[in-house]
Image: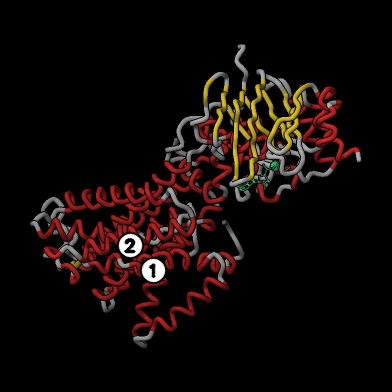
Amino acid sequence: MAEPALELRDLNKAYGALTVTDHVSLALPDGEFHAIIGPNGAGKTTLIHQISGLVPSDSGSVWLGGRDVTGLSLPERVHRGLVRSFQITSILPGFSALENVALAVQAHEGSSFRFFGRAREEARLNAPAMQALEEVGLGNRASVRAGLLSHGEKRQLEIAIALAARPRVLLLDEPLAGTGPEESAVLIALMQRLRGRMTILLIEHDMEAVFALAERVSVLVYGRIIASGPPAAVRDDPEVRTAYLGEEGG
Amino acid sequence: MMMPPESGPGFLKREAVPVLVFVLLALVPVAATFGAESYLLSLVTRVMIFAIAALSLDLILGYGALVSFGHAAFLGLGGYAVGILSAHGQTDALVQLPLALAVSALFALITGALSLRTKGVYFIMITLAFGQMAFFLAVSLAAYGGDDGMTLPGRSRLFGLDLIKNDRAFYFAVLALLLASYLLCRSIVVSRFGRVIRGARENPQRMAAIGFPLFRYQLAGYVIAGTLCGLAGFLLANQAEFVSPAYMTWQRSGELIVMVVLGGLGTLHGAIIGAAAFLLLEEWLSGFTEHWKMIFGPFLVLVVLFARGGLMGAIRRIGGGGHG
Ligand SMILES: Nc1ncnc2c1ncn2[C@@H]1O[C@H](COP(=O)(O)OP(=O)(O)OP(=O)(O)O)[C@@H](O)[C@H]1O
Ligand SMILES: [Mg+2]
């Protein structure tokens, strides 16, 4: 299919006088692993909010597989295959890890207007949930309360929840945020395995991870995409070096 | 999809409290034969009716974190359905009860659809406002007693028969309905639907990102809770043989919240225990002094401060912590 899996057309967003998303257009072909980098406060999270439908855009549109989803709510977009994670861990802390994922399966498997029968014991929900947990490496932590998992495990759990929704396009907002070196190695390996299986838009500060994973990289500065291309080209772009990478290079 | 019934050695320990509660309630009429029968029966009948109302509130408050401050409106709606129909000569429960439930469900649907668009304090305020609207509507019903309320010609009839005229028969009817309400709520809480409601309490944003449009689930929960409370209103009118706007004061809504919190939020049997504790303490303390609220207030503060999880939390801790 020639239609891009995800396409952003001239998205804009301002909070009062502060322009946070400035004429952002981007097209991700099916199966691409695309990373967005940019300094703190560049508007990366806001962009993910706009794409996922959590925050309305001032103007512009979001297209999923050639269909305009701009008017759809967050849950509706999820049902079209546009699934996201959060920069700040967002799980159901009082539920077991398995139930966190089983709920995601439940959202996509039949009706939730069922008032009888124990949801927790439904094999139809638990089996795919277990599979997703194993996929992210949490198979042996299924019965642990999600709130008691380590930070890295919570990040893995969030990805399992997203996978259980069977995404066509997966938006990951800094999945490595706050993780130690060992935890990030696990998560990077996990993203490596997901590569090519779905279209992924990754926001990440960790340059090493970005350049290892992404097929294309876009650089967001003050809400504007200043460069977009293969990692090597972006790294050598003079504008990028002054605006962003230069800061790190010193 | 029905699951095998719970059984095994863990069952009694796990279910000790609710089993004990219902066994005690079943034994009350026996104990009552030894004296003060009609007083005791009517007091505990009232407790059970409020227990149904508290249960229904626990469903959305305890499990859904929806602090509805207008829940007493449904007591009034159920009660006035009985009162108004009786005033027009329609005394059969087969007509009164469905109407009481339908009116409650409709009111919940309309007010819920508006209230659930708000969150937090605004939700509390708007449910309070709808509760007050219902209250003033009742006050304005001059044809049905206005401020003073109206006395019913008698209890509802069933198939034209006086089946619940007898206090003891009425007691058992209410007990059966309380048990049915309790089992229904328990089923809902662990069902797929209940899991969505509970998830929304924990983290609504996560639930939306999973793909749940929460509004419609919360609205359904609100309608179920309102309808169940309408049943309590229907029963309350029959118990008192009198309905008045006092059924739906905002203080009454507050008392329902207190019952649920006192018993322990999100436990269901806690709501029953909370309703019993509230009404029995009120009865007992008001026997000592008319200033009983001076004692009752601090007591509530102590329970909330020191018995986190309400009376059920305290029972669990004393019992060595069984289930959650
Ligand atoms: N709800 C809001 N109201 C007002 N300003 C906001 C709001 N959300 C974000 N902003 C501002 O918009 C800008 C972009 O924020 P955003 O969180 O999108 O940046 P980011 O690129 O994700 O940053 P980080 O790398 O720190 O996660 C910041 O200046 C932020 O203060
Ligand atoms: Mg961010």
Q: Nearer the viewer, residue A144 or B260?
A: B260
Q: Residues within 10 Å of mark 2 (few under 14, many from 20)?
A: many
Q: Quadrant of residue A3?
A: top right
Residue bearing the label numbered 1:
B255
Residue bearing the label numbered 2:
B72
The chain letter under disc 1 is B
Q: Quadrant of residue B293?
A: bottom left
Q: Residue at x 52, y 30 (%)?
A: A70
Task: Identify the colour scheme used.
Answer: secondary structure
Circle 2: residue type? Ala
Q: Quadrant of the C terminus of chain B?
A: bottom right
Looking at marks 1 and 2 on the same chain, the residue that comes earlier in the sequence is marked by 2
Q: Quadrant of the N terminus of chain B?
A: top left
Quick check: which quadrant has ligand 2? top right
Residue B247 placement, left or right of A113: left
Mark 1 and mark 2: Cα distance apart in space: 9 Å
Determine whether A212 is above or below B265 in the image.
Answer: above
Mark 1 residue element: helix
Q: Nearer the viewer, residue A152 or A80?
A: A80
Q: Residue at x 56, y 53 (%)?
A: B10
The chain letter under disc 2 is B
Q: Nearer the viewer, residue A245 or B9?
A: A245
Query: Do the residues under discs 1 and 2 have CB atoms within 8 angstroms?
Result: yes
Residue A243, position as x, y percentages in the image? 81, 36
Determine whether B291 is above or below A82 in the image.
Answer: below
Residue B99, position as x, y percentages in the image? 21, 50
Q: Nearer the viewer, residue A198 or A95?
A: A198
Residue B319, position as x, y percentages in the image? 58, 66
Circle 1: residue type? Glu
Asked whether residue A156 appears in the rendered view, the answer is: no
> Disc 2, ligand 1: is the CB inside 8 Å?
no
